[in-house]
Image: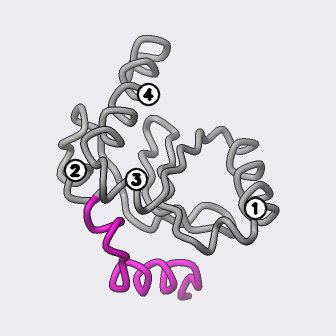
Amino acid sequence: MRHPHRDRARALRRQSTEAERCLWRYLRNRQCLGRKFRRQFPIGPYIADFACPDAMLIIEADGGQHSADKTKDARRTTFLENKGWTVLRFWNNDILAHTEGVFEVIRDWLRAKSIDHPV
């Protein structure tokens, strides 16, 4: 039986935004403190842009459509946090203009998580 979210996730990976492609270059192949990240990762009824399952961390790259519907994003974040995930959101323009800074925020969060809960 085919999983509908899996098919949607595959399509989203093929249609990545410039910001998602930029950030993926930093997260792929365990480049971020040896952590495994996945792109377009299905979680319940949602698909996370990037997820690190062992750290329960989701990274969202938000474009202009997210400023228009904050209620939808809040509902999504609440659902994911209730499942034990932490959601870090970055605007696409910040990812593109300040990639190293965004990556440092992610690394800092993972370092703090490692101190609290060693892998």
In which image quadrant can residue 67 be found?
bottom right
Label number found at residue 17: none
Kindly identify the amino acid type of the residue bearing the numbered disc 2.
Tyr
Label 2, label 4: how many angstroms apart (C-alpha)?
15 Å
The residue under the point 71% across, 60% down is 73
Tell me the mark number nearer the camera, choosing from 2 and 3.
Answer: 3
**Residue position for label 4:** 109
Label 3, label 4: how many angstroms apart (C-alpha)?
17 Å
Around disc 1, counting alpha carbons within 10 Å, would you say few (fewer than 14), some (14 to 19), or many (20 or more)? few
The answer to whether 115 is drawn above or below residue 76 in the figure is above
Q: Nearer the viewer, residue 109 or 93?
A: 93
**Residue position for label 2:** 26
Sequence-first tag of 2 and 4: 2
In the structure shown, which secondary structural element does the residue marked by tag 2 occupy? helix
* Colouring convention used in this rendered image of the protein: one colour
- The quadrant the N terminus occupies is bottom right
Around disc 2, counting alpha carbons within 10 Å, would you say few (fewer than 14), some (14 to 19), or many (20 or more)? some
Q: Residue most toward the top?
A: 115
**Residue position for label 3:** 94
Kindly identify the amino acid type of the residue bearing the numbered disc 3.
Asp
Sequence-first tag of 2 and 3: 2
Label 2, label 1: how many angstroms apart (C-alpha)?
27 Å
Residue range corresponding to the magenta coloring: 1-22
Magenta residue check for 8: yes
Magenta residue check for 90: no
Q: From the top left corner, tell me how far across and down residue 23 is, in percent.
A: 30, 57
Sequence-first tag of 4 and 1: 1
